[in-house]
Structure formats: structure tokens, C-alpha cells
Amino acid sequence: MGWFEERGGLAGTVAVVTGGAGGLGRAIVADLVANGVHPAVVDLDPAGVAELQDSPAGQQAVVHHGDARDPAVLTALFEAADARWGRLDTLVNVVGGTFRAPFTDTGPKGWDALLRTNLTHVLHACHLAVPRMRAGGRGGSIINITTIEAHRAAPGFAVYAAAKAAVEQFARTLAVEVAPDGIRVNNIAPDFVPTPNLERIGTGDNAMTDPEGVKVAIPMGRAGYLTDISECAVFLASRLSSYLTGTTLHPDGGTWASAGWFNWPAEGWANHAPLRVLRASEAGQCAECGRPAENVAGRDDRSGSARLSGGSS
């Protein structure tokens, strides 16, 4: 047994993962299984569920097709994990999603959908997990996938950002309530991690698909990888984080720390768009070469347009 296996203590433990059949969730499940964890997964995507069931990870898992926003679906998943393994050590809440719209263009139906997708199911899942972890007497780890938008303004995503911020505050409070039981509650708040769901939402002018656009917006100069997030989840599930609770990990390449500062190609770091970029935009020119923008294939205005995190989308 290696150092990590001995210190981490994950082998033989059980994790419930909501939204675990695609994107971030699938990566988290794969890494947990690689460390000896038995996962119970629910996901709304039938193709993703079928693919997971047929994969090596799926052979060691309970995999349900269903909507994690439905309390009955969540209850069935937890009961299936009880029946198969008789224990629960980790809960990972991955399910989430949003749409882009100014707040005044939305209404109660949309607000309710966003709250159910990003907040309410977290409450249900935690309500099911904590009594099981207490009964086991071994403590446990609850991990919520949130987003950098829970920590900054997110124009076009007001209710989504509010819901994710609510998850963060809920986690802090729950962490204190269950700390005497050895149960830890933490969050992971990514920024830009390309996933299929993120592609469907879109990222404005797609500047973040251009390497130069990524260098402007993300201090470390690259988009996030799925494994940047899944490895955080493995850490929080393991005993290596046994004294860490009520906090948030930020695997975002430095965007939370930079807080609105951008690394412009010519000017360097600034918390505003350079004047040359604004003037070029007004003139319909490429800010780099002065040619008409429509004649510069594959370029963008690097204007730092609003982005949605890949955290749980």
C-alpha cells in the first residue's frame, strides 16, 4: 500500500454522487473508483447513464437514471446504496445548471427552476446523508460543486449566482452543526472548465475557446481540466482533509484571486479594457493589427465577456 492509499483511507468507502454520469460528475466518479470507492450515481442523461453502466467504473457502482431534483429519486438512490453496502462515507452534489438572461427578463417559473436545480436538491441530499453518516459512526465528507459565480457578480446569471452562494453559506453552517459527528462539509468552486453543458449555454463571443482569450481571463493561462476538479473531490473525500471543513477550494487558475484583473496582450494586467481595444471596437477593427475585424479570421475582441463556470453546468 502506497503513502496516499494509506493516508487517504478511501478504499472500501461508499459515495453517493448526484449528476455523476457526465462531465465533471463522470470525472469525479472515475477518480473515486480509481481509489477504491464504491459509488452510487444518479443522472438525468440516459445516454450518460448507459455509458457509465457499461464502463469499468459502472461495474462497481449503483447507477440510476433519474432527476436528482425529485426527493423520491434521491431517496431511492440512498436506499439502494444502503442495501448494497450498508454504509455511506461521502456525498458529492454535482447537479446544477443555468441559462443566460438579464434578471428582469426572467420570472418566477425560471427562478424556481434555477433554485431546484442548484440549491434545493443539495438540501434534500444532505438531509438524507447526514443521518446515515452519523449512524455509521465514522464521520463523513459532503462535497458541493459550486462555482466562482458564487463569489462575484455574474450579469446574466443573477439567480444562478444567488443559488450557488446559498449553497456555500448552507455548507458553512451545516459544517458547524455536524462537526461534532466528524462529518465535514466543503465546496469546490471552479471557473471555466469546458463541458458539454457549458458548450450548450455558450460563452458570449466564444473568446474563451481562443488560447489568447484564455490567457487574458485566467492568470494561469489555460482553461480548467476535468481532473483539476475531480482531484479536489478525491482530496476532500479522503482522510487527507480530515481537519478541513466549512470552506471552499478554488481550482480556477487564479481567477478568484485576480478578482476582475485581466492580462491584456500588450498592456499586461489591468482591471479595465485598454483604450486601444475600445477604440478598435468602435471602429470595427482588430485591436492587434488594425485591420477590419471581419477580415481577421479566428480572432476575438478579448473583451473579457461574461463567462459561466463549468462547476456544475
Image (tube, grey):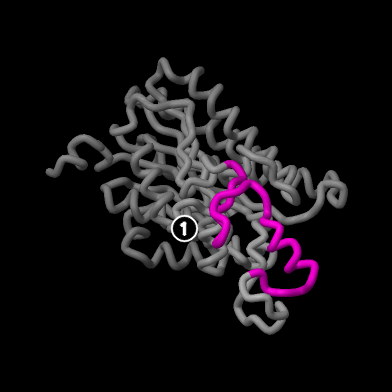
Q: Amino acid at mark 1?
A: Gly
Region of the chain picked out in magenta, as a range: 259-287
- Residue neighbourhood size for the residue with mark 1, other residues' Cα within 10 Å, grouped as few (<14), some (14–19), many (≥20): some
- Image coordinates of residue 97 in percent, x first then y, are 64, 52
| 90 relative to 55, above or below | above
Relative depth, front residue between 73 and 52 = 52
| 233 relative to 134, above or below | below
Q: Which residue is disc 1 drawn over?
A: 221
Residue at screen point 48% across, 59% down: 223
The reply to whether residue 21 is visible in this rendering is no
| Residue located farthest toward the bottom when viewing the structure as drawn | 295
Say if the magenta span includes residue 282. yes
Relative depth, front residue between 143 and 257 = 257
- Determine whether, in the image, residue 81 is placed left or right of residue 260: left
Residue at screen point 27% across, 40% down: 10
Residue at screen point 78% across, 44% down: 111
| 51 relative to 3, above or below | below
